[in-house]
Image: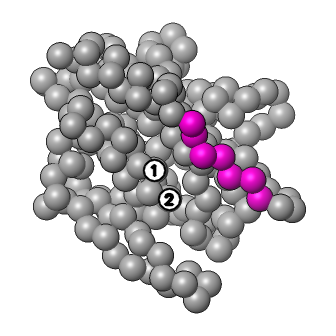
Amino acid sequence: MRAETIKKLEALLKDRDTAQINLDGDHVHAAVMMILRYDDDEFSLLFIKRPDNVNDPFSGHIAFPGGKIRDGDGTKLNAAIRETYEEVGVNIQASGRVLGSLDDVNPNNPRAANIIVTPYVSFLPEEVELKPCEYEVEAALWIPVSHLTDENNFLIRLREREGRSKEDYVYSYDKYIIWGMTGRILRQFLQLSSGLF
């Protein structure tokens, strides 16, 4: 079942055209890595909690490992792989495999309006020890996909941004709340993979 699910997910990701955002003016490219694993007879996704930091527009948020593209990365995917290793100690190239990418997202946060984020999806076939970077990660947690697909743990709230009402997808898990850009990425993933998990 596990191998078949991953095979179907990979096919779904590869058989679609991803929407890319092109912004005028100065903008910054970034990438994040969604990491799936199969443990205790269920799939889970890895999330991190970012530390509180007044200089970080995503201070304290629940997020996926990732960050801005640096000189030398070459591609957005390489940036996501590098950031994942730096933040949680997981070497996707050595321990797992990348299945594909999702549509680009642009944060609603005015402090990060010039950032374009490309989400990638990967799978770890075996358990890997997490080694969170204390400067970038306050906590790392695996959340079962079954919990995230349970409507009791999800709500849509409307938020005002620049005079317009926007949908914000909010997921709850234990004491954690997933919302904002990460909520939008997660919503896109769960809609795409509907019926697989």
Cβ atoms under marks 1 and 2 closer than 8 Å: yes
Q: What amino acid is at disc 1?
A: Ile
Residue furthest out toward the right: 25
Q: Which quarter of the picture shows residue 173?
A: bottom left
User: Which span of residues is magenta-colored?
Assistant: 17-23
User: Residue at 66% across / 64% down in the picture?
Assistant: 112
Callout 1 secondary element: helix
Q: What amino acid is at disc 2?
A: Met
Q: Residues within 10 Å of mark 2 (few under 14, many from 20)?
A: many
User: What's the coloring here?
Assistant: one colour
In the image, residue 21 lies in the stretch drawn in magenta: yes
Where does the image place residue 194, in percent across and percent down from the top left?
Answer: 27, 41
Numbered mark located on residue 181 in the image: 2
Work out whether 62 lies above or below 141. below
Depth check: give the residue in front, 23 or 114: 23
User: Residue at 33% across / 22% down in the picture?
Assistant: 8
User: On the picture, is 189 further left or further right than 133?
Assistant: left
Where does the image place residue 51, in percent across and percent down from the top left?
Answer: 49, 56
Q: Please name the predominant secondary structure of the magenta segment in the image.
A: loop
Work out whether 153 lies above or below 75. below
Where does the image place residue 58, in percent across and percent down from the top left?
Answer: 55, 62
How many angstroms separate mark 1 from mark 2 (CA)?
6 Å
User: Residue at 54% across / 84% down in the picture?
Assistant: 164
Q: Which quarter of the picture shows residue 67?
A: top right
Depth check: give the residue in front, 103 or 2: 103
